[in-house]
Image: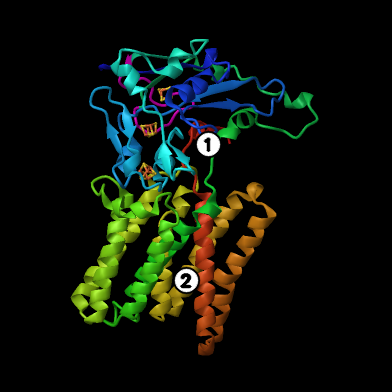
């Protein structure tokens, strides 16, 4: 195995002084509080006997960089001379997808500029024969820069279990085994898992309510595909072509609200070769236009084609989240948009028994997920869950049992609202991988 220049981080020497962060800020003129390098501190609560662990991380210029593959606009490039993973600001849409896929929390979204920024390995210094400013200025030698093995430490303590091959070598990780365990018998406090308290501060979930444009876009995509599918069996799509365009237009317009640079949205299909986000946008456009043509000209062959494109669109949406998600609920959250499309295909196709079966299945999955995280449920989430159950199952079940056609709009509205809440809760549960996340899964 060959060697490559990279960071070396020694847990046992890091005192959490932030000199590396300051050095990066000064070298690259970044504007605080946004920093390209971050020192994660554990045991912020300063609980006695737990000890302290610090971890200095920035971009690790992965040799299989997920950010580079995922970015829809192709904003990430490899510098041929230094092999640094470089972000190109002019190409960035501010979609934040790279902040999800990076397991080291390296790309930082700058709300002022509307795009992300990240460490560039001080490649200007490397080209002059110097080492990065952060490593140069670490006073204890905890962070250094030198030749390391190409694949230095798969599954190193505090890093990712994914095979992304970060250019960082971890040493001094014996801190892991010398974290003292609290003698529970000697305390009167509530029993605690000391490892969990020590590392939990870095567990990171999305600010899910801010993701409402994504929830609306993905919901409307699945809604349209389901509505379209409803007519395939009897060769008559129960959807006006103009209404399809209006709903699709609303979905696209809302989705751009998620971008830091909405006017650059046209660059989102730059990276079809590796980015599921690019594929999702392309498939959405193809589905809508082929679907529109098929309904407008009442052509069954283009309708079959549009149905297939709709299915690929939903697969693309799912793949966006599958490749990022961590945690035990991953499987239960898979196929969410496909399930939504099937619900609306049954509703608009008037297959009520199938609709009830699907809603019951979704409700069961939902209850399993809620049941597995009862300890984290706040009163607000409990209330939202109750509303979701009433709208997404109780009311539809009651209306279908009554067989009263005059309530069909109430049924439609109830199912739509229930499914939108379900989609929002999907984003609440969605957790991109972060440093120590896989370790936390073991100590939970
Ligand atoms: S550390 Fe994150 S941002 Fe840097 S190359 Fe790896 S995946 Fe990309
Ligand atoms: S376009 Fe999106 S994925 Fe690409 S760098 Fe910008 S925020 Fe990250
Ligand atoms: S390598 Fe340079 S840009 Fe990257 S964190 Fe260190 S000082 Fe900052």
Image quadrant holding the N terminus, namely top left
Specify few, some or many for label 2: CA neighbours under 10 Å numbering under 14, 14-19, or 20 or more. Answer: few
Place residue 252 in its image quadrant: bottom left
Secondary structure beneath disc 2?
helix
- The alpha-carbon separation of the residues under discs 2 and 1 comes to 33 Å
Q: Is residue 328 above or below residue 166?
A: below
Residue 135: x, y in percent? Answer: 44, 16
Image quadrant holding the C terminus, namely top right
- Closer-to-camera residue (212/421): 212
Place residue 151 in its image quadrant: top left
Span of residues in magenta? 148-165
Specify few, some or many for label 1: CA neighbours under 10 Å numbering under 14, 14-19, or 20 or more. Answer: few
Cβ of disc 2 within 8 Å of ligand 2?
no
Residue 59: x, y in percent? Answer: 40, 29
Regarding ligand 2, which quadrant of the image does it lie in?
top left
Residue 267: x, y in percent? Answer: 29, 51
Q: Residue at x 58, y 21 (%)?
A: 53
Q: Is residue 155 magenta?
A: yes
Which residue in the protein does label 2 denote? 357
Residue 153: x, y in percent? Answer: 38, 21
Q: Residue furthest top?
A: 140
Q: Which mark is residue 441?
A: 1
Q: Is residue 63 magenta?
A: no
Q: Is residue 361 above or below residue 119?
A: below
Secondary structure beneath disc 1?
helix
| Horizontal arrangement in the rendering, residue 1 relative to residue 338 (left or right) | left
Q: Nearer the viewer, mark 2 or mark 1?
A: 1
Give whichever of discs 2 and 1 has the lower sequence position.
2
| Horizontal arrangement in the rendering, residue 152 relative to residue 331 (left or right) | left
- Closer-to-camera residue (232/280): 280
Q: Does the rendering let one see residue 197?
A: yes
């Amino acid at each position: 195995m060959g060697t490559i220049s990279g960071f070396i981080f020694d847990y046992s020497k890091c005192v959490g002084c932030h000199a590396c962060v300051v050095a990066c800020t000064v070298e690259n003129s970044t504007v605080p509080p946004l920093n390209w390098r971050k020192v994660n501190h554990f045991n912020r609560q300063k609980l006695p006997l737990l000890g302290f662990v610090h971890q200095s991380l920035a971009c690790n210029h992965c040799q299989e960089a997920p950010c580079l593959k995922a970015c829809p606009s192709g904003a990430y490039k490899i510098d041929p001379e230094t092999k640094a993973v470089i972000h190109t600001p002019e190409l960035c849409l501010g979609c934040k997808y790279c902040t999800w896929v990076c397991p080291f929390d390296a790309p930082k979204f700058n709300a002022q500029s509307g795009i992300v920024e990240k460490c560039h390995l001080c490649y200007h210094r490397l080209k002059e024969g110097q080492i990065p400013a952060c490593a140069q200025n670490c006073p204890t030698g905890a962070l250094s820069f030198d030749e390391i093995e190409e694949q230095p430490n798969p599954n190193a303590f505090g890093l990712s279990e994914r095979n992304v091959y970060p250019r960082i070598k971890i040493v001094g990780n014996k801190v892991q085994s010398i974290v003292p365990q609290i003698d529970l018998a000697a305390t009167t406090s509530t029993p605690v898992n000391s490892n969990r308290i020590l590392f939990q501060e870095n567990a990171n979930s999305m600010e899910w309510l801010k993701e409402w444009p994504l929830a609306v876009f993905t919901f409307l995509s699945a809604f349209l595909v389901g509505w379209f599918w409803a007519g395939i069996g009897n060769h008559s799509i129960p959807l006006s072509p103009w209404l399809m365009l209006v709903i699709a237009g609303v979905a696209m317009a809302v989705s751009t609200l998620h971008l830091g640079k909405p006017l650059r949205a046209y660059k989102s299909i730059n990276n079809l070769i590796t980015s599921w986000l690019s594929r999702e946008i392309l498939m959405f456009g193809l589905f809508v236009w082929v679907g529109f043509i098929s309904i407008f000209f009442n052509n069954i062959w283009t309708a079959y084609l549009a149905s297939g494109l709709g299915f690929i669109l939903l697969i693309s949406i799912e793949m966006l989240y599958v490749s990022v998600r961590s945690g035990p609920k991953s499987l239960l959250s898979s196929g969410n948009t496909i399930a939504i499309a099937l619900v609306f295909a049954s509703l608009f196709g008037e297959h009520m028994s199938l609709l009830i079966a699907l809603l019951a299945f979704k409700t069961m999955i939902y209850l399993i997920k809620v049941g597995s995280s009862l300890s984290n449920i706040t009163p607000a989430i409990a209330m939202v869950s109750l509303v979701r159950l009433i709208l997404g199952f109780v009311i539809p079940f009651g209306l279908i049992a009554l067989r009263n056609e005059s309530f069909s709009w109430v049924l439609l509205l109830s199912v739509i609202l229930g499914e939108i809440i379900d989609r929002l809760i999907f984003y609440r549960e969605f957790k991109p991988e972060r440093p120590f996340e896989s370790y936390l899964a073991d100590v939970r």
